[in-house]
Image (cartoon, grey):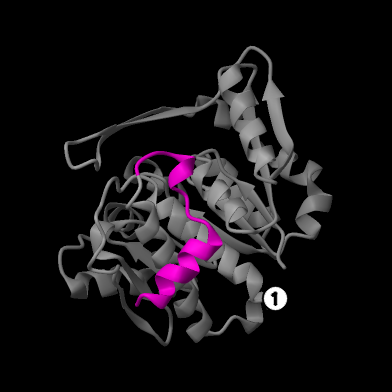
Amino acid sequence: SYFFSLFINIIKTIATAARIGEKVAMLSVIGADELGRGARSHLAGLGVDVSMVREIPGRGSAIYLSILNPNRDMHLGLCDMEIIQELTAADIRKAGTVFESAAAVALDGNLEEEMLRDATEILSDKMLFYDPVSANKAHRAKACIGRFHSIKPNLIEAEVLSGMKIETDEELRNAARYFLDKGVKNVYITLNCDGVYFKNKEKEGFIRPPKSIKIESATGAGDAFWGTFLYKLSQSNESIEKITLDMAVEYAGFANAAASLCVENFGGIPSMPLLADVEKRMKMK
């Protein structure tokens, strides 16, 4: 299967890929504190290769706080990701042997614009994936968005990246078409409780979640989707040239099932689905 090397600081996507059965490696930085060391230890316990997670003395680890509304959806997010600026192109080159065996790389939207540009240039021969993380940071990838094989913005992030207002299905299609014209192979725009809209050169459509879902918390659904999508891609054992359009759609449906399971549970990593649970949800459709 594929070996995924992930630049990522929000650990839910990594945890999903690892819990569902994928081999995962992480390149990142943490501070000299229990928060970062605990996160690294937890990921190692899930089977993630954390040998490329560098600890920086005198710095605090990145932290994210999500404040939920009465519907258990995010009302406000607060974060301190300053330490991510310590990641440089030199870190990518230093981990060259790992990337040689990596068929796919997911880049975190918390990376600075320069780092995103450098990473997409150095790893141009890899299958690159991008999750914007937030609307406030999505603009960082605007100049290099066409270098990604697949992207997963939500509606607001898609508006920032495309420069288009998205209020109708037609505007949604136009925004997705913009990304394809830039060079993106597959576009997945998440629609909160309405599922995900996908588009590539030959197919498009909506993948809706089961109607019976009881949402406990929408936080983490996108991470579950992305981690599971990467897992399905790895299981295909195909090179980027052999990933068919039908396969891309199938993987999105599987990933959407994982996201629907995530929102039914409250909490962080415990809400991330296991493979058997996702397969069971798929049979319910």
Quadrant (top left/top right/bottom left/bottom right) for the C terminus: bottom left
Residue 101 appears in view: yes
> Magenta-highlighted stretch: main secondary structure?
helix
Between residue 237 and residue 143, name the one nearer to us. 237
Q: Position of residue 59 (x, y in %)?
A: 60, 16
Q: Residue drawn at (35%, 81%), measured in percent from left and top?
A: 204
Between residue 114 and residue 62, name the one nearer to us. 62
- How many badges with numbers are in the image? 1
Between residue 31 and residue 41, name the one nearer to us. 41
SS for tag 1? loop
User: Where is 281 relative to 18, above or below?
Assistant: below
Q: Position of residue 78 (x, y in %)?
A: 34, 28
**Location of residue 7 by image quarter:** top right
Residue 146 appears in view: no
Q: Residue drawn at (56%, 43%), measured in percent from left and top?
A: 8
Q: Residue drawn at (73%, 60%), measured in percent from left and top?
A: 102
Q: Residue drawn at (20%, 75%), measured in percent from left and top?
A: 170
Quadrant (top left/top right/bottom left/bottom right) for the N terminus: bottom right
Q: Is 281 positioned to the left or the right of 46 in the image?
A: left
Q: Position of residue 160 (x, y in %)?
A: 31, 52
Magenta residues, start to end: 266-285
Q: Which residue is mark 1?
A: 237
Q: Is 58 positioned to the left or the right of 278 in the image?
A: right
Packing grade of label 1 (10 A; few <14, some 14-19, many >=20) is few
